[in-house]
Amino acid sequence: MISYQSLAEKSIGGETLTRDECHAVLQSPDSDIMDLLAAAYMVRRTFCGNKVHIHVLMNAKSGLCPEDCGYCSQSKVSTAAIEKYPMVTQEKLVEGAKRAKTAMAKRFCIVTAGRGPTPREIDFLTGAVRRIVDEVGIKVCVSAGLMDEAKARALREAGVDQLNHNLNTSERYYSSITTTHTYQDRMKTLKAARAAGLNLCTGGIVGMGETDDDIIDMLMELRELNVQSIPINFLIPIKGTPLQDKNYLTPLQCLRILCLARLLNPKQEIRVSGGREVHLRSLQPLALYPANSVFTEGYLTTPGQHWKETLQMIKDMGFEIEAGDETPVQQTAPSLA
């Protein structure tokens, strides 16, 4: 028998869970899920309180990507029926940022499909970010693929405070999902972003056929990197992608993964990201016990929960919404009792 409370105390004390303990979390009995959630919440409350950060993203450049990422509907190997378009206008990005602020988002995330941004695209993005910061007053995250320190620095100087660049999976499994770039290519981008002074939003995708060891390796690596934000995505098996038949996640397993992410990364922002509506289903509210951040309004080429429903879910669970203006909306403290 494992004591989940002892794992929480170990995490709060700065100790790293052993691999056996990590496996015990991922393989915990269904009947233990509330005890596991209580342990993860103990850690979450210690370092993050009862606040929830809302994030809204916008696909600024869709499809037409030369990479072969098997999970992505925008890759060159995908035949998914998605809308494809070049870079949107700065006006559309500003309008998107305004909608994100209306949704009480703490951060607006701009995403562009492609291997990495060209100098021209960096110029466009920096101009858009300056306008968003000046006209909207919301924090901005950018996800634009592989880049060097000079490009990352240009984004930071324009007002970007966080760069999203996910590990996606373990180093061992990486070549199984992508062959047009390497795990080390992604690590180089993270190193460049950190050298440029950007905070790191770095997480992964689960449900792609990886093993429990791959999940543990990824979360351990994120602990070593000490990133600021960790989005956990649950694969949406989109028709027309190489991983279209991968659909085995259960709501309880998704919760176990989120709990392990919290126990291994106690102080970080853990975000419930793509696929939460598909795989967590009716158990979505319980994800707020280990996680302190959510995406709302959709995920690039797939729809998501409306922001008003997300706000209501957070309110119903008794958490605080930390809005973009840093003024939290007070609610009743949650309880697992």
Image (tube, rainbow, N blue to C red):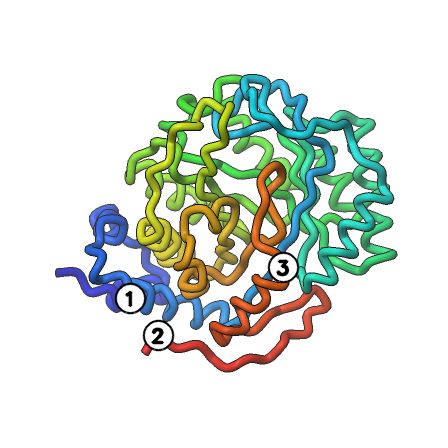
Q: Nearer the viewer, residue 69 or 102?
A: 102
The residue to which callout 3 is attached is: 307
- Residue 7: which quarter of the image? bottom left
Secondary element under disc 3, as helix, strand or loop, is helix
Secondary element under disc 2, as helix, strand or loop, is loop
Looking at the picture, which amino acid does disc 3 mark? Trp
**Could you tell whether 300 is left or right of 325 in the image?**
left
Front label number (2 vs 3): 3
- Residue 170: which quarter of the image? top left
The residue to which callout 1 is attached is: 34
Q: Position of residue 261 (x, y in %)?
A: 39, 52
**Could you tell whether 194 is left or right of 3 in the image?**
right
The residue to which callout 2 is attached is: 336
Q: Earlier in the sequence, mark 2 or mark 1?
A: 1
Q: Earlier in the sequence, mark 2 or mark 3?
A: 3
Q: What is the spatial separation of the Cα atoms under label 1 and label 3, in whole angstroms?
A: 27 Å
Q: Residue at x 52, y 67 (%)?
A: 313
